[in-house]
């Protein structure tokens, strides 16, 4: 017998997917930013500049992707609050 609630059966998987996607994007962006200065040591100036530009493009793409994913996450939370009127927001907020 399954112990999952109907909410978890309907909404649990997309919510967990979005949470892990946000974490993965943040960790990837952090690691690239941390590795960038170390990778350029010992490179020729022209090669280092091209590498720096490439990393910048990747970080920019990750930033926009992260903003879109977080935005969709916020929209989904507001849909649950105002349209579905279920207890999703109540579960996220701390109880006094």
Image: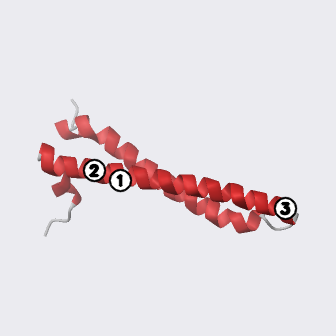
| Snapshot quadrant of residue 70 | bottom left
> Dot 2, crowdedness within 10 Å: few (<14), some or many (≥20)?
few
Is residue 86 visible from the viewing direction of this image? no
User: Residue 1, relative to residue 77: is it above or below?
Assistant: above
Position in image of residue 32 (x %, y %): 63, 59
In this orientation, which residue lies closer to the viewer: 64 or 34? 64
User: Which residue does the image show at 41% across and 51% down from the upper left?
Assistant: 68
| Pointer 1 residue | 71
| Pointer 3 residue | 46
User: Which residue does the image show at 21% across and 37% down from the upper left?
Assistant: 3
Report helix, strand or loop for mark 2: helix
Count of numbered labels shown in the rendering: 3
Question: Position of 55 compared to 4: left or right?
Answer: right
Structural distance between the alpha carbons of marks 3 and 2: 44 Å
Position in image of residue 50 (x %, y %): 77, 57
| Pointer 2 residue | 75
Position in image of residue 49 (x %, y %): 78, 62
Report helix, strand or loop for mark 1: helix
Structural distance between the alpha carbons of marks 2 and 1: 6 Å
Report helix, strand or loop for mark 3: helix
């Amino acid at each position: 017998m399954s112990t999952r609630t109907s909410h978890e059966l309907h909404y649990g998987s997309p919510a967990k997917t979005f949470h892990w996607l946000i974490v993965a994007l943040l960790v990837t962006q952090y690691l690239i930013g941390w590795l960038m200065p170390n990778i350029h040591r010992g490179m020729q100036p022209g090669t280092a500049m091209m590498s720096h530009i490439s990393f910048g493009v990747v970080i920019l793409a990750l930033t926009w992707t992260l903003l879109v994913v977080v935005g969709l996450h916020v929209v989904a939370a507001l849909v649950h609050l105002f349209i579905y009127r279920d207890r999703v927001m109540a579960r996220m907020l701390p109880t006094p």
